[in-house]
Amino acid sequence: MSPHRRYARAKLAGLLLHAGLRRRTPELVITDVHPGLVASDFGRYLGRTGAVLKILARPVLSSPGAAAEHLLRPALRPGFDAAHYHRGRRRKLSPLVTDGRLQQEVWDDAHARLRDYLA
């Protein structure tokens, strides 16, 4: 599996765990925030492909400071709620993330892997 695919699956697993935690603890406000594409060295694992993509994507990349604002904006908004935000704007979640069966499978897998640490 490519590094990018592993990264994407890890992000999906995190969103599924957040959704499962939201379902189990409705009294908590759990918000997912994606700052968008950031002008950083994060994609260095993509090698030459990453370097080319970085040049092509330059017009849509956020500076690290702007990305930080995207992360904070939802928390500073009146009526802050449990939702998913992308670049500071509320967005609808993918059907994969709202799939209750998939949420449960990821939750159970994480719990089994962490059982010794959760005791």
Image: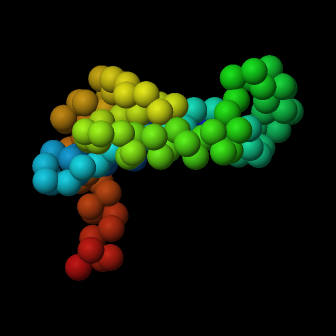
Q: Quadrant of residue 79?
A: top left
Percent of width and height locating residue 9:
48, 39
Q: Residue at x 25, y 30 (%)?
A: 98
The quarter of the rendered structure image containing the N terminus is top right
Q: Residue at x 36, y 34 (%)?
A: 84
Q: Residue at x 43, y 28 (%)?
A: 89
Residue 81 versus residue 38: which sits nearer the camera? 81
Residue 103 versus residue 105: which sits nearer the camera? 103
Instruction: Tell me if I can see residue 93 in this picture.
Output: yes
Q: Is residue 75 left or right of residue 106?
A: right
Percent of width and height locating residue 4:
62, 37
Tag count: 0
Q: Is residue 96 left or right of residue 108?
A: right
Q: Is residue 22 left or right of residue 62?
A: left
* Residue 24 higher or lower than 84, as above or below: below
Q: Is residue 102 left or right of residue 74?
A: left
Instruction: Tell me if I can see residue 2 in this picture.
Output: no
